[in-house]
Image (cartoon, rainbow, N blue to C red):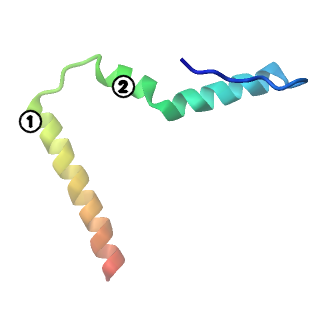
Amino acid sequence: MLIIPIKEGENIDRALKRYKRKFDRTGTKRALQTGKQFDKPSVIRRAQIQKAQYIQGLRDAENI
């Protein structure tokens, strides 16, 4: 549960914006979305390999 203390005299829109920002940073929405559909293990593994290749490419470019 997220708790957002509202300061005295603070606009409700600003407090709502802080709540939304904090909610996005927790990653709750992303976790719910990934749990909605089943991904085959081969698809997950392929995504991991592509991510590793991308990161390795960045590291190689950094060292040149």
Work out which residue is located at the far left of the displayed protein and give it. 42
Labels 1, 2: front one: 2
Name the N-terminal-most of marks 1 and 2. 2
Which of the 4 quarters of the picture holds residue 21?
Answer: top right
- How crowded pointer 2 is (Cα within 10 Å; few <14, some 14-19, many 20+) is rated as few
Taking depth in this image into account, of 28 and 44 the one nearest to the observer is 28
At label 2, the amino acid type is Ala
Percent of width and height locating residue 19: 64, 25
Which residue lies at the image location 25% right of the left edge and 51% below the top edge? Answer: 51
Q: In the displayed structure, would residue 58 be above or below residue 7?
A: below
At label 1, the amino acid type is Ser
Q: Would residue 4 be found to the left or right of residue 61 on screen?
A: right
Q: Quadrant of the C terminus?
A: bottom left
Work out which residue is located at the far right of the displayed protein and give it. 9
Q: Give the CA distance from mark 1 to mark 2.
A: 20 Å
The residue wearing badge 2 is: 31
Circle 2: element type: helix
The residue wearing badge 1 is: 42
Which residue lies at the image location 78% right of the left edge and 23% below the top edge? Answer: 6
Q: In the displayed structure, would residue 53 be above or below residue 45?
A: below
Percent of width and height locating residue 53: 21, 59
Which residue lies at the image location 91% right of the left edge and 24% below the top edge? Answer: 9
Taking depth in this image into account, of 26 and 58 the one nearest to the observer is 26
Circle 1: element type: helix
Which residue lies at the image location 35% right of the left edge and 75% below the top edge? Answer: 62
Q: Would residue 56 be found to the left or right of residue 33 on screen?
A: left
Residue 22 is labelled as none
Percent of width and height locating residue 12: 80, 19
Q: In the displayed structure, would residue 37 be above or below residue 26?
A: above
Q: Would residue 44 be found to the left or right of residue 15 on screen?
A: left
